[in-house]
Amino acid sequence: MDKEHLKGEAKTAEGHIKDGFGKLTGDRKLQAEGKLAKVEGEIRKKVGDVKDSVRKAAVRPK
């Protein structure tokens, strides 16, 4: 697991908190920010997956 995975997890958690709090208070802007943060977190995790794949491919001798 690299930094992108950790950043992705943190951003996703932040998104869940904002989205939930927005639903609780009826704040649609906060909900939207939460949903956006969740998407950003998922993207960061996918970037981390790609980086991991590239590292593994570069290390394997052919």
Image (cartoon, grey):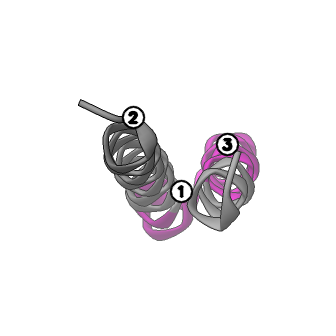
Q: Are marks 1 and 3 in contact (CB under 8 Å)?
A: yes
Q: Earlier in the sequence, mark 1 or mark 2?
A: 1
| Residue density around tag 1, few if under 14, some if 14–19, many if 20 or more, within 10 Å | many
Marker count (numbered): 3
Q: 15 left or right of 46? A: right
How far is the residue under mark 2 from the one under mark 3?
Answer: 38 Å
Q: Is residue 19 magenta?
A: yes
Q: Position of residue 21 (x, y in %)?
A: 75, 50
Farthest residue to the front: give it: 62
Q: Earlier in the sequence, mark 2 or mark 3?
A: 3
Q: Position of residue 8 (x, y in %)?
A: 59, 55
Dominant secondary structure of the residues highlighted in magenta in the image? helix
Q: Are marks 1 and 2 in contact (CB under 8 Å)?
A: no
How far is the residue under mark 1 from the one under mark 3?
Answer: 6 Å
| Residue density around tag 3, few if under 14, some if 14–19, many if 20 or more, within 10 Å | some
- Amino acid carrying label 1: it is Gly
Q: Nearer the viewer, residue 59 or 54?
A: 59
Q: 31 left or right of 6? A: left
Residues in magenta?
12-33
Q: Nearer the viewer, residue 47 or 29?
A: 47
> Residue 16 bears which disc, if any?
3
Q: Quarter-wise, where is residue 53 in the image?
A: top left
> Residue 34 bears which disc, if any?
1
Q: Position of residue 4 (x, y in %)?
A: 57, 62
Give the structural element (helix, strand or loop) at label 3. helix
Reading the image, the residue beneath label 2 is: 60
